Image (tube, rainbow, N blue to C red):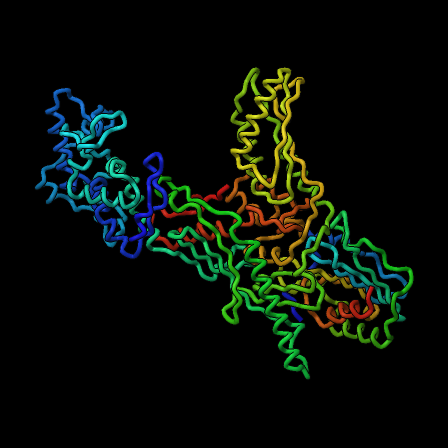
């Protein structure tokens, strides 16, 4: 785990990060993950939602944009694009709980960097919904969340 | 020393080109000049100087006409001034036994309070050539008059000093004239010392933002600023695997070597030699010889003592970044130019150019540019001259009820833009219109076919040189760009204001494009100023950032 500093959300939050989806999790959703690059191109941005039953909804940026400060230009699909095994869902929530996710400060910085990315995790852990923004951070849970996207796609 | 002969005089006879490179023996070479300077700055301590002045006073009194003559037999105010204003000269005994003489020791002028009685203001030295003697056979002046032997009345010390100045690159006549210019001769000595004592280096230089780190070496003799960055490469997701065959290993090594070779070549060529610097310290005839200072950016692969650790992920997708602990991370696809990912690029540049394109007004029946007009045209031309992409078509429209005036004014504006540096890849078209008005309207139209490309490797390398992102990150709107202050210091407020427009798209490499712009050399400009301030013993008034400017 590499966390350089943490605290409340910065007042001068990046416009792209400020434009993230901040709505409460929908019915049955246990994790929402949004990945926003801090480069000029939004092409590598993606997001996904995982339901308690393993339903997987994901979408990535089209790569073409008129407004680079809009982090996403595609909606999540109406239907799940994959099914995550129940065991994997349980493992993921357990991993988040082991990192005391629900009690973490809302902004975590792993390394002071030019560029990189911000990963936004909103999850229901231990019955509490919580959102944490990770800037260039590396934790086992973040790695697992990121790997899910590459495994199940979008 | 053998190279000294390469120095030659320019057309005006007073601004020689590159003097020969001094060597470690430079101190010995300019000792005569140093002695002559001492005579002039520390008089009346110098017996030699005293003799010359007395000699001139005596001879002046014997002149039938009461006026002095120069080399070509003409009266000169300077020479009259030299004699009339010459302070009383002490006897040689007094001079020899007087207050301590301020001397050069090991080539360095002593600092601190001067001894009492020592004069501090250099005065014009007398011309040693006023004497009416037979002119040197075969030597003629500009008007055909016979010339005198220019060195005939020089003391042995001054002759040696003149020889030094000739070695420097002046002709003998200019050298004699310059002997009395203590600012010039002192600067020449400093120049030789400055060049000979180089190169000046700041190893492991860290930029103020703590992200940039590199070696900087300035060699005045070769007019080069070398920026060298050592990078250790690692390939975290392309390591040896269990059961890997020797062939697999060889292929892996080849992949890594190919990546490194391409990276070093691409980044080096992208950043090297784009802009140059110039020294603006006075006297320009001396310090101007340091110019232009070429900038060479080189990246070396290393296995130890690196400035940066580069983590190259061959298969993982993520966003490239550079940390302030000098770690560069590049991911899959970052070695490929990303085309046209932001469609607004042209609009952003167009907006910026529109902001600075002037409308130049003229007086009634006037065909002269106002000072304001010149300034705005120069700024516009300079901005475009430093912009290699996108291409811009500059359209000039002269407006007047008199078509002849409109046409004349358009040509004047076009010439002014050319003088300001406007040229390829940009183009200029012009037309004159008979209509109300006394002005020339300047427009800049960005090439609509331009396709922006994002160069990730070159962009990250900019961070490794200490540059921040030019687009809005976090709350850095407008002048919040970290390098605004340094850009303002290096290139002026107008330019800094124009560039500090976070949020607008640009083809700039530190925005979303691939064009290395003049402001991207500001940390290199800064290190040059710092090196020559901290590392050089001369000149006594140390060089600082203000002494170094960007070339066109």
- In terms of depth relative to the viewer, which is nearer, B141 or B54? B141
Q: Residue at x 66, y 18 (%)?
A: B434
Query: Residue A98 occupies which quadrant of the picture?
Result: bottom right
- In terms of depth relative to the viewer, which is nearer, B115 or A103? B115
Query: Residue B315 occupies which quadrant of the picture?
Result: bottom right
Q: Residue at x 36, y 55 (%)?
A: B198
Which x, y percent locates residue B465?
54, 56
**Does residue B446 appear left or right of residue B111 in this picture?**
right
Q: Is residue B473 above or below residue B491?
A: below
- Direction bottom: furthest residue: B243
- Direction front: furthest residue: B138
- In terms of depth relative to the viewer, which is nearer, B324 or B99? B324
Q: Number of numbered discs present?
A: 0
Which x, y percent locates residue A42?
74, 55
- In terms of depth relative to the viewer, which is nearer, B229 or B482? B229
Specify whether residue B303 is in view: yes
**Does residue B129 appear left or right of residue B199 in this picture?**
left
Which x, y percent locates residue B235?
63, 71
**Does residue A1 appear left or right of residue B113 in this picture?**
right
Which x, y percent locates residue B250?
62, 76
């Amino acid at each position: 785990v590499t966390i350089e500093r943490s605290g409340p959300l910065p007042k001068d939050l990046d416009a792209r990060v400020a434009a993230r989806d901040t709505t409460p999790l929908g019915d049955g959703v246990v994790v929402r993950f949004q990945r926003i690059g801090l480069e000029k191109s939004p092409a590598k941005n993606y997001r996904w939602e995982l339901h308690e039953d393993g339903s997987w909804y994901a979408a990535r940026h089209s790569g073409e944009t008129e407004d680079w400060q809009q982090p996403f230009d595609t909606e999540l699909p109406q239907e799940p694009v994959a099914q995550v095994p129940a065991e994997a869902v349980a493992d993921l929530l357990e991993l988040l709980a082991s990192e005391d996710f629900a009690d973490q400060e809302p902004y975590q910085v792993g390394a002071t960097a030019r560029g990189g990315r911000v990963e936004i995790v909103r999850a229901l852990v231990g019955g509490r919904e919580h959102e944490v923004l990770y800037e260039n951070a590396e934790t086992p849970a973040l790695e697992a969340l990121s790997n899910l996207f590459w495994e199940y796609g979008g | 020393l053998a190279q000294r002969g390469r120095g030659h005089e320019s057309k005006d006879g007073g601004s020689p080109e590159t003097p020969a490179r001094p060597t470690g023996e430079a101190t010995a070479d300019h000792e005569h000049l140093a002695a002559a300077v001492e005579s002039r700055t520390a008089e009346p301590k110098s017996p030699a100087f005293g003799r010359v002045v007395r000699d001139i006073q005596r001879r002046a009194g014997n002149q039938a006409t009461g006026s002095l003559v120069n080399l070509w037999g003409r009266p000169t105010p300077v020479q009259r001034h030299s004699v009339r204003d010459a302070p009383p000269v002490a006897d040689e005994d007094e001079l020899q036994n007087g207050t301590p003489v301020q001397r050069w020791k090991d080539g360095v002028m002593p600092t601190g309070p001067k001894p009492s009685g020592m004069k501090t203001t250099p005065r014009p030295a007398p011309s040693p050539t006023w004497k009416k003697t037979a002119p040197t056979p075969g030597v003629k002046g500009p008007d055909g008059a016979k010339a005198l032997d220019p060195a005939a009345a020089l003391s042995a010390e001054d002759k040696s000093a003149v020889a030094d100045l000739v070695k420097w690159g002046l002709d003998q006549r200019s050298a004699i004239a310059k002997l009395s210019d203590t600012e010039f001769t002192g600067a020449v000595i400093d120049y030789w010392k400055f060049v000979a004592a180089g190169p000046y280096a700041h190893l492991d230089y860290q930029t103020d933002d703590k992200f940039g780190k590199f070696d900087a070496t300035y060699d005045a003799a070769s007019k080069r600023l070398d920026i060298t960055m050592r990078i250790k490469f690692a390939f975290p997701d392309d390591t040896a695997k269990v059961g890997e065959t020797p062939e697999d290993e060889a292929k892996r090594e080849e992949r890594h070597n190919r990546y490194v070779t391409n990276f070093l070549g691409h980044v080096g060529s992208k950043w090297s030699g784009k802009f140059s610097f110039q020294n603006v310290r006075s006297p320009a005839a001396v310090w101007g010889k340091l110019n232009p200072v070429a900038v060479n950016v080189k990246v070396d692969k290393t296995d130890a003592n690196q400035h940066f650790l580069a983590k190259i992920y061959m298969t993982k997708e993520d966003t490239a970044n550079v940390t302030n602990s000098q770690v560069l991370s590049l991911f899959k696809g970052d070695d490929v130019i990303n085309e046209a990912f932001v469609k607004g690029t042209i609009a952003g540049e167009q907006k910026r150019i529109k902001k600075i394109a002037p409308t130049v007004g003229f007086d009634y029946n006037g065909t002269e540019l106002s000072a304001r007009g010149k300034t705005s045209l120069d700024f516009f031309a300079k901005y475009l001259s430093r912009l290699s992409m996108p291409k811009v078509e500059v359209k000039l429209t002269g407006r007047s009820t008199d078509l002849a005036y409109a046409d004349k004014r358009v040509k004047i504006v076009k010439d002014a833009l050319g003088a300001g540096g406007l040229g390829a890849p940009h183009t200029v078209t012009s037309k004159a219109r008979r209509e109300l008005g006394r002005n020339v309207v300047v427009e800049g139209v960005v090439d609509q076919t331009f396709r922006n490309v994002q160069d990730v490797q070159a962009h990250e390398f900019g961070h490794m040189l200490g540059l921040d992102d030019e687009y809005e990150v976090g709350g850095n709107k407008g002048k919040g760009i970290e390098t605004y202050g340094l850009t303002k210091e290096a290139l002026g407020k107008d330019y800094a204001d124009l560039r500090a427009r976070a949020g607008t798209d640009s083809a700039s490499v530190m925005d979303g494009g691939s064009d290395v712009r003049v402001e991207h050399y500001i940390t290199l400009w800064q290190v040059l100023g710092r090196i020559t301030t901290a590392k050089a013993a001369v000149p006594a008034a140390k060089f600082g950032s203000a002494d170094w400017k960007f070339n066109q």
